[in-house]
Amino acid sequence: MVAATFAALVVLLVVVWLSRNLQVRPTSKKQAVLESIIDFSNTTTRGSMSDNDAASFKLYGFVLFVLIFVSNQLGLMLQVDVNGITYIKSPTADPMFTMTLALFTIALSHYAGVKKLGFGGYFKNTYLEPFVFWLPLALFEEFSNFLTLGLRLFGVIYAGEILLKLVGGLAFSDGIVTMIGLAPVELIWQAFSIFLGAIQAYVFVTLTSVYINGKISAE
């Protein structure tokens, strides 16, 4: 909870800082960076649904992408342990956080489907297509989508942090020799972890748009 709150605060402060003194034509690098992130998240959202439908979910896609990206990188830059309890780390290394994001996304997709198609149209489109007996398989698919969406993100980030801790522990295990020898390995893995964190944020937003589109597009 502490790590998630800290990550959200970081996102808020960074976005507020980047959005100061906005101009119609960008004159600062800060605005250019912010607009690049927005364009990227918007393109990701539009990749799985029509422009008209995507317009309603662009803000959600942007917030989701930035929050997950920052959360993925947080543990690489800062970890706070007090009496053996880690208070500040990557929130996405906690399954409760990733499963909450997945639950919110799945719930939003169902809400969007009901809002656009009506309950009857949504229920038929989601659970009774292509035939009535599809219902049990559709229910299983919904549950598996929820699990895989949250656990995929958790597994990648958690494994990355564990490996970083192992490499760091080995680096300090035998003095200056191991520190020098394993320093390149640590740096390479950190760089790779940053890349993985960005990819996982992109994948999560992409799957979110796919799930939402599946609920609002009548077959």
Image (spheres, rainbow, N blue to C red):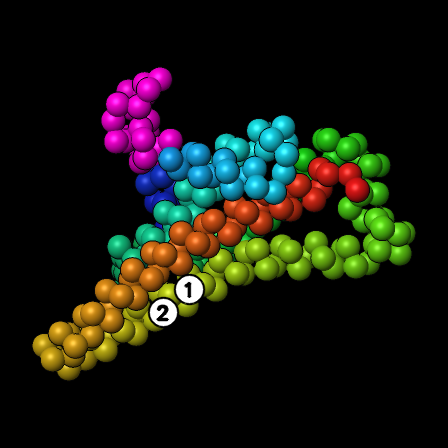
**Above or below — where is 143 with respect to 28?**
below
Q: Is residue 25 magenta?
A: yes
Res. 162 mark:
2
Quadrant of the image occupied by residue 187: bottom left
For mark 2, give the secondary structure. Answer: helix
**Above or below — where is 218 with respect to 56?**
below
In this view, the residue farthest toward the right is: 132
Callouts 2 and 1 close, C-beta under 8 Å: yes
Res. 158 mark:
1
Identify the amino acid type marked 2.
Ile
What residue span does the magenta drawing correspond to? 12-35
Q: Is residue 168 left or right of residue 119?
A: left
In this view, the residue farthest toward the left is: 176
Q: Position of residue 55 (x, y in %)?
A: 57, 29
Q: Position of residue 123 (x, y in %)?
A: 81, 42
Q: Position of residue 45 (x, y in %)?
A: 54, 39
Which residue occupies 46% across, 54% down? 200
Identify the amino acid type marked 1.
Tyr
Classify 10 Å Cα crowding around label 2: few (below 14), some (14-19), many (20 and above).
Answer: few
> Which of the image's four quarters has the C terminus?
top right
**Above or below — where is 108 with respect to 191?**
above
- Frontmost residue, 9 versus 1: 9
Q: Position of residue 197 (x, y in %)?
A: 40, 55
In this view, the residue farthest toward the bottom is: 174
- Frontmost residue, 13 versus 195: 195
Classify 10 Å Cα crowding around label 1: few (below 14), some (14-19), many (20 and above).
Answer: some
Q: Is residue 207 visible?
A: yes
**Above or below — where is 3 with respect to 123?**
below
Q: Is residue 100 visible?
A: no
Which residue occupies 41% across, 68% down? 159
